[in-house]
């Protein structure tokens, strides 16, 4: 009869055509704190938690199966998930290559996957079932063009080839910004009908009401960077050097992600006002340090999304951000956007944020409004709709 759902046998239950019986999520290669995938690990963890929380009565999926490892079991083996511990060492590169190229299709068939989700963006060479890859960015191609030799050439060539193959052959592609969608379309023309932009969900960050013990005395600017060139630690320190020498009473600078200033061009006078932390163990300390800042500076050269400015906005800290790549669409008008190579322009933005109380108040309120665009409720609804295709 017209209008009635078409039903068919699956061997266990009757289900509506198009619904997912079993969703398999490949998390075998994810190890927190290892490699360059901390953001992907956090996304996968949050995604699994929210998929599970919104599927308690099985309205979206009969079963969610996570293929994991001994290192991530504590984060992914949660109520509502069927966690399957895979053999092998995910820290061994050869093991990971064999896994992602050949073993995943066998595991997908073994556990009866109606769809398999790849949070890292790499699908196996040969898989004929329904699959979805999450491609976060195309930064490996950026390094190949702008910073050749910084990354291991063979490893980067392998990653680029795997990303190209995934873009070309995946049944569905999720990416995390319009910028990344355009990059994928340019790399793989005609892929647009298979690509869906779903912004990352933003987890709530909280800071202690007490002043962080890591905080310097007086007013300070908080910045994140790393030794990776695209994170632009050099630009952060050059900008601060210019700001320092143009200001009678400069705010200090705290940089999280580098061990010190020695490898970068900065005057001794300005360097004396800079505190660096390569890594902050306690998340609460990091957020409290950020919350106490008068401004947040983020001058990355390329991002597929960009969480740090949004975390600063959640904590009521005005943002000065690079205008490159996805950052303009994520930050919007809730922060001051600047050319990261234009130090004079960035210094002007910093001075405005630090000195103009009316502007500060306006940016703080816009920041609170902006982060609501990335709530998990709307993100997870979009994920379920996409995974059910």
Image (spheres, helix red, strand yellow):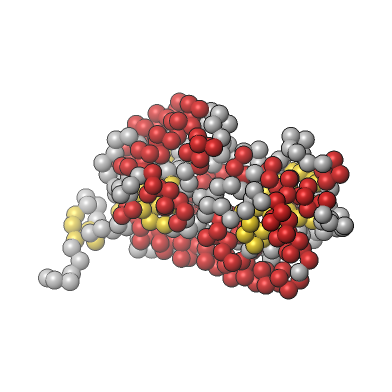
Q: Position of residue 379 (x, y in %)?
A: 46, 61
Total residue callouts: 0
Q: Quadrant of the image for the C terminus?
A: bottom left
Q: Residue furthest left?
A: 1
Residue under the point 55% across and 47% down: 302
Tell me which residue sits at (37%, 49%) in the image: 185
Q: Is residue 204 visible?
A: yes
Identify the residue shown where x is 52% and y is 63%.
374
In the figure, residue 259 lies in which quadrant? top right
Q: Return the x and y of residue 138 as percentages of the image width and height.
A: 47, 43
Image quarter of the N terminus: bottom left
The foreground one among 247 and 5 is 247
353 is higher (above) or lower (below) than 131: below
Compared across the picture, whether 276 is left or right of 90 comes to right
Left-right relation of 200 to 309: left
**In x, y percent, where is residue 382?**
40, 62
> Can you tell which quarter of the image residue 87 is in?
top left
Q: Report the side of 266 relative to 46 (left or right).
A: right
State whether residue 336 is above or below residue 64: below
Residue drawn at (78%, 53%) of the image = 243
Vertical side of 34 occupied by 21: above or below: below
Q: Closest to the observer: 54 or 247?
A: 247
Q: Nearer the viewer, residue 293 or 267?
A: 267
Residue 294 coordinates in the image, percent (x, y): 76, 61
5 or 179, nearer to the observer = 179
């Amino acid at each position: 009869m017209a209008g009635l759902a078409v039903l068919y046998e699956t061997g266990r239950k009757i289900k509506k055509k198009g619904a997912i019986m079993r969703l398999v999520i490949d998390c075998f290669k994810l190890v927190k704190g290892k490699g360059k995938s901390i953001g992907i690990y956090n996304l996968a963890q949050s995604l699994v938690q929210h998929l599970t929380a919104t599927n308690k009565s099985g309205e979206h999926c009969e079963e969610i199966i996570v293929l994991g490892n001994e290192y991530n079991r504590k984060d992914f083996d949660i109520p509502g998930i069927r966690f399957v511990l895979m053999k092998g060492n995910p820290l061994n590169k050869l093991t990971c290559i064999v896994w992602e190229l050949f073993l995943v299709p066998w595991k997908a068939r073994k556990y009866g996957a109606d769809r398999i989700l790849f949070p890292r963006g790499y699908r196996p060479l040969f898989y004929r079932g329904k699959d979805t890859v999450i491609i976060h960015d195309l930064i490996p191609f950026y390094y190949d063009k702008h910073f050749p030799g910084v990354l291991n050439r063979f490893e980067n060539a392998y990653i680029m080839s795997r990303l190209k193959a995934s873009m070309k052959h995946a049944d569905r592609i999720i990416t995390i910004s319009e910028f990344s969608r355009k990059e994928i379309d340019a790399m793989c023309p005609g892929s647009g009908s298979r690509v869906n932009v779903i912004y990352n969900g933003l987890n709530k960050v909280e800071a202690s009401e007490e002043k962080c013990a890591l905080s310097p005395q007086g007013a300070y600017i908080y910045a994140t960077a790393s030794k990776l060139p695209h994170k632009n630690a050099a630009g952060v320190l050059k900008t601060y050097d210019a700001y320092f020498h143009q200001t009678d009473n400069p705010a200090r600078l705290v940089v999280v992600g580098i061990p010190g200033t020695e490898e970068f061009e900065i005057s001794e006078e300005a360097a004396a006002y800079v505190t660096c932390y390569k890594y902050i163990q306690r998340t609460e300390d990091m957020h409290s340090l950020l919350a106490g800042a008068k401004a947040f500076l983020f001058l990355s050269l390329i991002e597929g999304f960009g969480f740090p400015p949004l975390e600063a906005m959640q904590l009521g800290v005005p943002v000065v951000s690079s205008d490159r790549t996805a950052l303009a669409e994520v930050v919007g008008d809730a922060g001051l956007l600047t050319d990261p190579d234009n130090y004079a322009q960035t210094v002007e933005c910093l001075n405005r944020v630090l000195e103009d109380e009316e502007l500060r108040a306006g940016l703080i309120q816009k920041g609170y409004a902006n982060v609501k665009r990335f709530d998990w409720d709307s993100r997870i609804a979009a994920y379920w709709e996409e995974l059910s295709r």
